[in-house]
Image (cartoon, grey):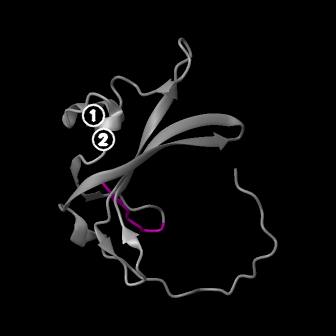
Amino acid sequence: MAKEVTNVELKGEIETEIIDVKKYVGKKAKISSFKVMENDIDGKQSYYLNVKTEAIDVTKEGKDITASRNFSLKFDTVNGGVGWASAGNLANFLNEHAIKDYKEIIDKEVVVLTTDADKNGQKWLTF
């Protein structure tokens, strides 16, 4: 949940590095990490698995450029706990990569893609 801050003075527009994501499309990268994330929107909990690749490149500012993908998770109302739908995106991804246990996702090679442009025209690296 976000909270308001009152001790930050906005300076206006700042120069930021623009990264041409198209040059990374088609490159291969290995998955380096995953973590289960929780959202709380209007008091309703939801979960997702955030999966990230190793650095594909580095910005001029020295920050890693990575691809990432979020997979929806579900709360099992019958048995309790959190998992994923048998016909969902995560199940399909695991099957496509011959992964039996989701923890084996580390070091799997993926092909970098971009997302569709968001409302600001920004595209993000995914796989």
Q: CB of mark 2 within 8 Å of CB of mark 1?
A: yes
* x then y, percent, for residue 35: 47, 44
* Three-letter amino acid code of the residue under disc 1: Leu
**Mark number displayed over residue 48:** none
Residue 8 against residue 41 in the figure, above or below = below
Camera-nearest residue between 103 and 52: 103
Q: How many residues crowd around disc 2 within 10 Å: few (fewer than 14), some, or many (20 or more)?
A: many
Number of callouts: 2
State the residue position of label 2.
Answer: 105
Q: What residue is shown at x 33% (from left), y 53% (from top)?
A: 32
Identify which residue is drawn at 82% across, 71% down. Answer: 6
Q: Amino acid at mark 2?
A: Ile
What separation in Å lies between label 2 and label 1 (alpha carbons)? Answer: 8 Å
The residue lying toward the viewer, choosing from 58 and 68, is 58
Query: Mark number for residue 94?
Result: 1
The location of residue 98, given as percent across then percent down, is 19, 32
Magenta stretch, residue numbers: 120-126
Q: State the image quarter where residue 28 is shown.
A: bottom left
Any part of residue 127 in sight: no
